[in-house]
Amino acid sequence: MAPIISISKLDKYFGRLHVLKNVSLEVPEKQVVCLIGRSGSGKSTLLRCINFLEEPSYGVVEVDGIAVQSGEKSKAHHQLIHAVRLKTGMVFQEFNLFPHMSVLENVIEGPITVKGMNKDQAIALAERNLEHVGLLFKKDEYPLRLSGGQKQRVAIARALTMEPRVMLFDEPTSALDPELIGEVLTVMKKVADEGMTMLVVTHEMGFAHDVADRVIVMAEGELIEDGKPDAIFNHPKDPRTKALVERRPLST
């Protein structure tokens, strides 16, 4: 069976800065992959290149059978990028909720405006996903009245309401107070347990160890180690991985 995500020989430059260096990666359907590494190692850039929030400089990104060759500017190229984005849900460090919209309005906005979904259908789907993350009772509230953890859970519901094939999480707990992190990780684990393919950039080593099927370590724009969580955390091969996991032990 073909992988649901396939990245081939991906490079990304910001001016002269070479941020991603010949990255190749395959992710099977329903696999949970955590990307770990020091800040500036290219983790978030890789995630953003998968759904073309950043245009790769070189290489090919394929999601659910839709392959996009970087560097093109044609109308067909932009149509392929749009098709890839419809397959991928994205959850950011910041919640990016519209402050002037209620929780429910935030969650239905994408399906209605991007996918052309009927409003009643979008509301029914949104309400199911808000219930899924434990926030249906907040559907008429505005973001200002939510905690950080609740905002991030709404962001997850919003992404799920687009019915993606793949979920991308870019350090989803990094902007949260420590006491709120657990509620978001619990929802993410629930999504993983239901078989969603997930790529998660995270500093939460306990989550990576307990939930991921596979952990990938990045350093200086390269994938330096890739394996089962136990192998990465207990028997790292690369000295940079060893230094990383010693600096962020699983218990913290």
Image (spheres, rainbow, N blue to C red):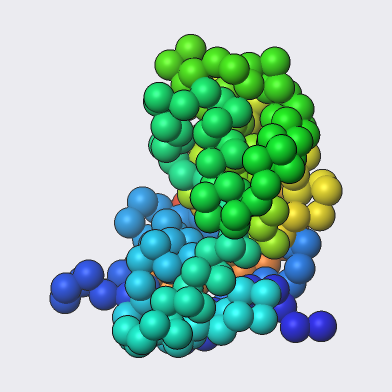
Residue 197 position within the rendered picture, expressed as x and y whole percent measured from the top left: 71, 59
Q: For the point 74% across and 72% down, which residue is it?
A: 28
Left or right: 45 as drawn, with respect to 148: left
Decide: is 213 above or below 247. below
Left or right: residue 2 versus residue 18 is right
The N terminus: image quadrant: bottom right
Q: Which of 14 and 163 is in front in this view?
A: 163
Give the total of numbered labels.
0
Position of 206 compared to 155: left or right?
Answer: right
Vertical side of 154 occupied by 113: above or below: below
Residue 162 point in image, percent of width and height: 64, 51
Q: Along the horizontal axis of the image, is 23 left or right of 162? A: left
Residue at image position (40%, 53%) is 38
Residue 194: horizontal and vertical position, in percent?
Answer: 83, 48
Which part of the image, by quadrant, shows the C terminus? Answer: top right
Which of these two is toward me, 101 or 170? 101
Examine the rendered structure and indicate whether residue 3 appears above or below residue 102. below
Question: Which of the pair 91/129 is nearer the observer?
Answer: 129
Which of the 4 quarters of the picture holds residue 12? bottom left
Q: Residue furthest left?
A: 16
Check the image and report above or below for 116 versus 185.
below
- The answer to whether residue 77 shows anywhere in this view is yes
Could one spot residue 32 in this view of the protein?
Answer: no
> Of all residues shown, which one is farthest toward the top?
145
Residue 54, picture quadrant: bottom left
Could you tell me which residue is drawn at 47 percent across and 21 percent down?
143
Residue 167, horizontal then vertical, whole percent: 63, 55
- Identify the residue at image location x=59%, y=17%: 140
